Image (cartoon, helix red, strand yellow):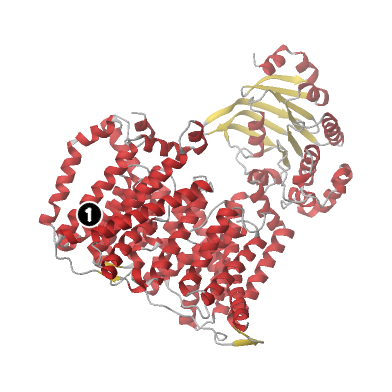
């Protein structure tokens, strides 16, 4: 672990930010608390995806599989087999990790290029959605309604509203922390080397498979856990939301807007887009359904055309120039720090 | 026996339409190296244009091609010129992300304009059936298949024996050498992108009779198209039509002999398997 | 016919060519010599318009073409036969020749010119329907020259036509170039092969690190000690 990591952890700004976020539920009306919780869900998912997609440079469109497994499998186990949702969370996370591992095996065994990887993961995601919708145990097309959240922690219940917010805050912080840690571990360095030039990485002895597989498994397990918590928060495991490849596309695009491959990039994207989208949906959703996705699409296209690396690098460079020191976090320079 | 014939006929008809959806994507990929993840959303755009014309002027979808084709070509040209061309030199992934953004724009633009309920744009020929021995086929599907093959053959001739076709192939084989021949590479790329989207206007009109439309169907069309293009070997038009038939027939056999779910999964499974063991596609790329 | 004055050109804002001034008279066979990386290909690409000029002027037949597109230059008869041939490998010889004359000014005379080219290069005639990618290096070079001729060149620019060819092909290719020149075609021959070029060209320029180091009649350039120096990179 590089010293930069501990330095950042000692930086009081992060702790202040976390504390401020933890105070949010005290003053927030429930509608805005809902938006804040949803934002945290996407911060968490974006950061988890970023480990593979941003740091590793592999556009995985399979993440709806993991989120869907976490949500649908854990809910189905509770409703159809009476298994505690904590156990369901762990089982789903294991299944997701295994699927992630298999995808990494396929990727390595058949030396998939970037495009093939995106296509094959999209095919898996489509199959996943079809299976969920066609399999009654997982809820089929109508989804699964979870029992009311009475705040029984041992039954994976957090009392709705505030409780769910703290759960999501924990998961978002965990996800950001894990991806930040990875960036500062040899794993992150290797992943970036592989992303920038796989042949060169192989030539200097980087174990391509081990690093890619590890990234994929970590990312899949995180996504699955977030999926279980998300389903619990919604109390309705909706296959068309949670196991649809559109979810992954949303995550990919938010991460792109924020800035791929940086620990805070996807978080920034989610912080901008989710509240914007939700408020648009709340105000105009009845009149114009789809407006918020339309705005997402517009923002994504505009950002890619204006600053292809995303907003975070742009902002960091502006700040660095203001303060007169030029070394934004997550850039190539920090890998040597 | 008649059941299998029926399934084969059905798969053949559907598959030829898949082939046509894929021709446009293959054409664009071959000259620009672009994989358009908004492809299926443009199919839906074409279908909704037919619906709008049918509602406003009671135009038959087949007739509305004369309006939707130039409209969609203009849309395609504009998308290429304003969105794709500026990042043409960038990494392939950037283009994928951009077209995913365009996909959200088109899909939700349609949702905002037409709402979330299913729509239909009926044709006079919609309910006509033909009996070929034991096999019953719907006339619109026969028209669609005939049009798909005609377009495939037309495209083949265009690419083989016309100056514009040779220019397109030249840009595909070596863009720099093509520029030295006095070919305007940028213009060829824009025109093929416009033509690729234009083909979707035709495909959409052929799909409309009998296919209810919903804005969210775009991604599945994109996925099926990608599958067919990749199986076909990306730029091999004969391979693409063949791959369309393989996918269409496997889908219809799967739905009859397995279950709805497994039938729908079958094309994806075949895709993954062929992709792994024969990454260059069904035929050798030419 | 062609006047290049104080030309600066290069890639990504960094000039490769610095203050290059070159004159080519109508009907001459002019040689452009230099070691690897001297800027020969950049020069020819700037004339074709594939690499933009940063400053300086290119005047062709009295017209300033400095900012014209590659297509517009091809239409004016400035034709490049590129280094490494760059034939279209998956197309037949006939299709390659047709492509050479696909621009709108060449099209009316295209079939007549193809006939002339096939007379000049009979080896191509025997293989008209063969894929260009299956030809030998020498045959591909012939095809590349033939393709250039179908375009109706006023100035034919050949980039390293001898590169990678067997000696007997080199000789044959240079005979063809010589013959075209005698028939009145203006030729710019870009070559690394010093002696061969000096033998065929009447006037030569020697580039070193993007600048014209020596110029003059071939006999003078041959004896100038700076020529050898430019080649050896001393």
The residue closer to the viewer here, A143 or A83, is A83
Residue behind mark 1: A168
Quadrant assignment, res C6: top right
Give the side of residue C54 with respect to residue A49, left or right: right
Image coordinates of residue A113 in percent, x first then y, are 52, 47
Callout 1: chain: A
Hey, which quadrant is residue A137 in on the image? bottom left
Residue A307 seen anywhere in this rendered image of the structure: no
**Residue B49, percent from left and from top:** 48, 73
Residue at 88% of width from left, 44% of height from top? C122
* A203 and C230: which is toward the camera: A203
Examine the rendered structure and indicate whether residue C142 appears above or below residue B187: above
Residue farthest along the left direction in this orientation: A26
B112 or C78: nearer the viewer = B112
User: Mark 1: which secondary structure?
Assistant: helix
Q: Determine whether A240 is above or below B170 in the image.
A: below
The x and y percentages for residue B234 are 60, 56
Expressed as whole percent of the image width and height from the top left, the position of residue A178 reads 29, 43
Q: Residue at x 62, y 37 (%)?
A: C66
Mark 1, Cα crowd under 10 Å, few <14 / some 14-19 / many 20+, is: many
Image side of residue B22 versus residue B120, left or right: right
Q: Quadrant of the N terminus of chain B?
A: bottom right
Q: Is residue A309 left or right of residue A204?
A: left
Q: Is residue C70 above or below residue B196?
A: above
Question: Which quadrant of the figure contains the C terminus of chain B?
Answer: bottom right
Q: Which residue reaches farthest top?
A: C225
In the drawing, does residue C23 fall left or right of residue B273? right
Q: Mark yes or no: residue C217 visible.
A: yes
């Amino acid at each position: 672990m590089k010293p930069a990591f501990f330095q950042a952890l000692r930086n009081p700004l992060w702790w202040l930010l976390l504390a401020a976020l933890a105070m949010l539920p005290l003053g927030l009306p429930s509608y805005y608390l809902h938006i804040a919780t949803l934002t945290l869900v996407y911060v968490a998912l974006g950061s988890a995806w970023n480990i593979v997609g941003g740091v590793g440079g592999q556009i995985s469109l399979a993440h709806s599989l993991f989120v869907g497994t976490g949500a649908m499998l854990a809910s189905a186990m509770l409703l159809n087999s009476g298994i505690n949702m904590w156990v369901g969370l762990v089982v789903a996370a294991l299944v997701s990790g295994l699927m992630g591992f298999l995808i990494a095996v396929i990727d390595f065994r058949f030396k998939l290029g970037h495009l093939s990887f995106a296509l094959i993961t999209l095919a898996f995601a489509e199959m996943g959605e079809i299976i969920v919708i066609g399999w009654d145990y997982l809820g089929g097309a109508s989804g699964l309604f979870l029992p009311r959240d009475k705040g029984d922690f041992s039954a994976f219940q957090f009392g709705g509203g505030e409780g769910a917010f703290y759960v999501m805050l924990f998961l978002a912080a965990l996800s950001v922390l894990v991806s930040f840690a990875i960036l500062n571990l040899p794993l992150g360095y290797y992943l970036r080397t592989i992303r920038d030039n796989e042949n060169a990485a192989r030539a200097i002895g980087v174990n391509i498979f081990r690093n890619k597989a590890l990234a994929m498994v970590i990312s899949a397990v995180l996504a699955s856990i977030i999926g279980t918590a998300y389903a619990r928060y919604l109390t309705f495991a909706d296959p068309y939301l949670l196991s649809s490849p559109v979810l992954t596309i949303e995550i990919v695009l938010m991460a792109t807007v924020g800035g791929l491959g940086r620990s805070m990039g996807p978080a920034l994207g989610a912080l901008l887009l989710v509240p914007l989208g939700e408020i648009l949906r709340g105000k105009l959703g009845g009149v114009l359904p789809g407006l918020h996705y339309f705005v997402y699409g517009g923002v994504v296209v505009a950002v890619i055309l204006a600053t292809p690396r995303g907003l975070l690098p742009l902002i960091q460079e502006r700040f660095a120039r203001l303060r007169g020191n030029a070394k934004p976090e997550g850039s190539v320079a920090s890998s040597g720090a | 026996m008649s059941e299998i014939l029926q399934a084969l006929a059905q798969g053949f008809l559907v598959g030829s339409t898949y082939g046509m959806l894929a021709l446009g994507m293959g054409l664009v990929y071959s000259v620009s190296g672009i994989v358009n993840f908004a492809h299926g959303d443009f199919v839906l755009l074409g279908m909704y244009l037919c619906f709008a014309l049918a509602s406003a002027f009671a135009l038959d979808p087949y007739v509305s091609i004369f309006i939707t084709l130039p409209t969609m070509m203009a849309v395609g040209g504009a998308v290429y010129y304003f969105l794709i061309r500026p990042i043409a030199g960038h990494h392939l992934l950037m283009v994928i992300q951009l077209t995913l953004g365009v996909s959200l724009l088109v899909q939700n633009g349609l949702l905002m304009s037409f709402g979330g309920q299913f729509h239909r744009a009926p044709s006079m020929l919609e309910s006509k059936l033909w009996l070929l021995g034991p096999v019953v086929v719907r006339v619109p599907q026969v028209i669609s298949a005939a049009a798909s093959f005609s377009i495939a053959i037309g495209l083949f001739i265009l690419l083989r024996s016309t100056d514009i076709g040779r220019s397109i192939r030249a840009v595909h084989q070596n863009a720099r050498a093509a520029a030295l021949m006095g070919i305007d590479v940028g213009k060829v790329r824009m025109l093929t992108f416009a033509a690729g989207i234009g083909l979707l206007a035709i495909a959409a009109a052929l799909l409309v009779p009998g296919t209810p439309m919903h804005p969210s169907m775009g991604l599945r069309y994109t996925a099926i198209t990608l599958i067919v293009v990749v199986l076909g070997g990306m730029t091999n038009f004969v391979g693409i039509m063949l791959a369309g038939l393989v996918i269409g027939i496997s889908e219809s056999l799967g739905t009859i002999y397995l279950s709805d779910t497994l039938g729908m999964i079958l094309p994806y499974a075949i895709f993954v398997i062929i992709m792994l063991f024969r990454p260059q596609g069904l035929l050798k790329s030419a | 016919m062609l006047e290049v004055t104080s030309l600066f050109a290069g890639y990504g804002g960094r000039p490769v060519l610095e203050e290059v001034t070159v004159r080519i008279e109508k009907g001459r066979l002019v040689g452009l010599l230099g070691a690897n990386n001297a800027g020969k290909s950049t020069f020819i690409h700037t004339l074709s318009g594939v690499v933009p000029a940063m400053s300086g002027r290119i005047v062709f037949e009295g017209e300033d073409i400095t900012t014209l597109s590659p297509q517009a230059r091809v239409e004016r008869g400035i034709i490049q036969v590129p280094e490494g041939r760059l034939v279209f490998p998956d197309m037949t010889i006939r299709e390659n020749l047709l492509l050479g004359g696909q621009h709108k000014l060449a099209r009316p005379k295209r079939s007549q010119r193809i006939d002339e080219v096939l007379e000049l290069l009979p080896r191509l005639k025997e293989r008209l329907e063969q894929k260009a990618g299956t030809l030998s290096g020498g045959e591909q070079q012939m095809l590349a020259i033939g393709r250039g001729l179908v375009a109706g060149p006023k100035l034919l620019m050949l980039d390293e036509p001898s590169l990678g060819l067997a000696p007997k092909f080199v000789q044959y290719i240079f005979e063809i170039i010589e013959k075209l020149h005698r028939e009145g075609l203006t030729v710019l021959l870009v070559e690394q092969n010093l002696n061969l070029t000096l033998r065929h060209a009447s006037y030569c320029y020697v580039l070193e690190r993007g600048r014209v180091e020596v110029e003059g009649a071939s006999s003078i350039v041959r004896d100038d000690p700076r020529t050898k120096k430019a080649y050896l990179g001393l």
